[in-house]
């Protein structure tokens, strides 16, 4: 098991000033490196408190790269549908060089109707745009004189500069919220997987992982290989009551911000997002006690969270876990406490 | 007079490894801050050694922001034609927050036909795309619930996150290579100006500045106000022979890389780029000795360059000068020498 920090903002200007948010986030990046965490990760979202302070994860990760020298940097995820592949491949290659090869690139389809509307991209083009975007970026990273004749982009011959630091290219991971077919496609293509167990039943996550591993095997790859990232809200305190009281507050905060962002799904349908019309109901009815009982949040004393992680390893196998240690206007000191307690009591158990 | 460092890459993989280029560039950023320079600046270009290591200036400047606390960060320039305004406004706002308000944003139309071709943007749409892009970014920075109904982009109502650190927004500068009308438009709109005296006759630069100041006056602004940036190749050494020998080598290198990048103009025409069909001939016939005689390059001993700068101030008035102190595979130590000599002998004369 490997553990990293997920810096997914869930604040708007009324909650926390953006400069303060970024100062805190960079302080957590430095702390995470000092305490030997595996990675830091951030997201691409717009307009809503749910992720909206991070419209360009590469910008934040470039600052993180300049403050660190060992920890890995992970996009979780960039959205090919919203950026031209020449631009996306180019800035990721810059980041990979700035970081001397510490970049892993998660790609996502995106799932918020308001974001698609702002970029003038139909939701129903989501999957082909994702597939084409990842393919174009991979070719720009690995080939010279690329001639690309896609449905959405046509260009070339061009040779991308700079070339990525890592050869043949940075590791690719695919974000999959609730769609087993996406997990299968990631396995078939030899990519890693970014999963969110908090919004899925345990059996659903197990199904996605099983289909991922089966697809790897069919493609002639080691079924036990591949990198599976799991994201969890995490709040630790030595005192159990304090951990549950504050962990609940911040988990509910994050859920509330997610609810604002997905509200357009109550009036949106897309054949490429089967089941998403249910998302507003699911998020509205999310219950912290049930999430805790199902080990969908890593909240509690270090001992209790260690037990949760042992069960998670039992269910899902070896994986890379991303800990969301900041939410809303949580003071930096509380995030630092979670990170420090995790490093002291939990990391050694999985070393 | 204010002085900053222009980090405009002019190398490809055969000349200098990208990771080494960025390491050196960040070392120069830190040196420039330590020696009290006003800004660092970088460019947006693609595919060619001429700027191609910097397809996304925001990525590099985010790393520079994380390594510094006082020096200003300038895009010179970002290209609205190649990035959706929601994405461009968002990542610039992230950078402005990461840098606690140290960002000035230069916007450019771009001028390399191969770049337009790769992004599928007709050269003949260059000016309306530029105007619309700058307007959209400015509105996203300053207004909430923005409804934008442009020719190329339609979106809204949306409220950009994060909000920029600087209010109402970071300073806007407009890059103008050879077109006096662009300088006039910048003046009318209250924007700053990015000029490149090395590719223009002195009288042409004076005309652009005069039209800029007149347009400011007509618009009811202080004609003496506004920020005018001038970029120069700069090579200093205590020994005059060494300065001229190496300064010539690197100026000719940069010119050679520019020639590769503009070669498509020998077979391209666009009504929005009047005069650009001449650019290949002009660049091919560029002569270092004549440039030196015309004070279009800042090469020589500190004393000689100080004299050049006094003449430049005489001709063009008070301005912000960006010094291109690295070119090709120049060793870092030579760039550092130029920066250090400049700080020691020249900055105090203009303090």
Image (spheres, coloured by chain):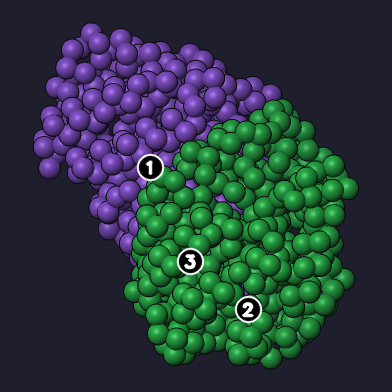
Chain colours: A purple, B green
Indicate left or right for A44 with A272 as reference.
Answer: left
Mark 1 touches mark 2? (CB < 8 Å): no
| Residue A188 position within the rendered picture, expressed as x and y whole percent measured from the top left | 41, 56
Mark 3 or mark 1: which is in front?
3
Crowd class of label 3 (few under 14; some 14 to 19; many from 20; radius 10 Å): some
Disc 2 chain ID: B
Image quadrant for the N terminus of chain B?
bottom right
* Of the image marks 2 and 3, the number of the one nearer the N terminus: 2
Residue in front for this viewpoint, A63 or A285:
A63
- Residue hosting label 3: B346
Q: Is residue B261 above or below residue B312?
A: below
Mark 1 or mark 2: which is in front?
2
Q: CA distance from mark 2 to mark 3?
A: 16 Å
| Residue A92 position within the rendered picture, expressed as x and y whole percent measured from the top left | 47, 57
Point 42% across, 20% down: residue: A329
Q: Is residue B58 above or below residue B300?
A: above
Q: Are marks 2 and 3 on the same chain?
A: yes
Q: Secondary structure at mark 2?
A: loop
Residue in front for this viewpoint, B223 or B7:
B223
- Residue hosting label 1: A41
- Residue hosting label 2: B295
Q: Decide if residue A177 is in sight here.
A: yes
Q: Secondary structure at mark 1?
A: strand
Report the label total: 3
Q: CA distance from mark 3 to mark 1?
A: 44 Å
Crowd class of label 2 (few under 14; some 14 to 19; many from 20; radius 10 Å): many
Indicate left or right for A134 with B345 as reference.
Answer: right
Q: Are marks 1 and 2 on the same chain?
A: no
| Residue B320 position within the rendered picture, expressed as x and y whole percent measured from the top left | 60, 58
Disc 3 chain ID: B
Q: Are marks 3 and 1 on the same chain?
A: no
Residue in front for this viewpoint, B249 or A111:
B249
């Amino acid at each position: 098991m490997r553990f990293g920090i997920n810096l997914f903002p869930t604040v708007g200007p009324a909650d926390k000033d953006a400069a303060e948010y970024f100062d805190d986030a960079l302080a957590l990046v430095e702390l995470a490196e000092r305490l030997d965490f595996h990675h830091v990760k951030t997201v691409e979202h717009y307009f809503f408190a749910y992720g909206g302070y991070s419209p360009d994860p590469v910008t934040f990760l470039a600052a993180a790269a300049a403050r660190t020298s060992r920890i890995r940097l992970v996009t979780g995820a960039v959205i090919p549908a919203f950026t031209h592949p020449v631009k996306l491949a180019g800035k990721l290659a810059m980041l990979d060089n700035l970081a001397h090869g510490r970049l892993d690139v998660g790609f996502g389809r995106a799932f918020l109707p308001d974001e698609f509307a702002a970029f003038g991209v139909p939701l129903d083009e989501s999957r082909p745009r994702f597939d084409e975007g990842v393919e174009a970026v991979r070719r720009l990273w690995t080939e010279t004189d690329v001639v690309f004749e896609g449905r959405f982009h046509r260009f070339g011959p061009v040779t991308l500069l700079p070339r990525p630091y890592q050869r043949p290219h940075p590791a690719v991971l695919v974000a999959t919220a609730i769609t087993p077919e996406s997990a299968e496609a990631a396995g078939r293509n030899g990519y890693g997987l970014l999963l969110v167990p908090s919004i899925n039943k345990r059996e659903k996550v197990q199904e996605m992982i099983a289909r991922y591993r089966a697809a790897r095997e069919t493609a002639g790859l080691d079924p036990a290989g591949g990198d599976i990232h799991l994201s969890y809200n995490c709040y630790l305190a030595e005192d159990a009551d304090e951990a549950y009281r504050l962990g609940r507050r911040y988990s509910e905060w994050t859920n509330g911000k997610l609810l604002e962002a997905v509200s357009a799904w109550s009036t949106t349908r897309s054949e490429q997002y089967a089941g998403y019309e249910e998302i507003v109901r699911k998020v509205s009815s999310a219950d912290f006690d049930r999430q805790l009982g199902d080990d969908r949040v890593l909240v509690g004393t270090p001992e209790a969270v260690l037990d949760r992680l042992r069960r998670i390893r039992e269910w899902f196998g070896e994986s890379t876990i991303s800990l969301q240690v900041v939410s809303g206007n949580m003071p930096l000191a509380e995030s630092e406490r979670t990170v420090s307690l995790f490093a002291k009591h939990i990391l050694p158990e999985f070393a």
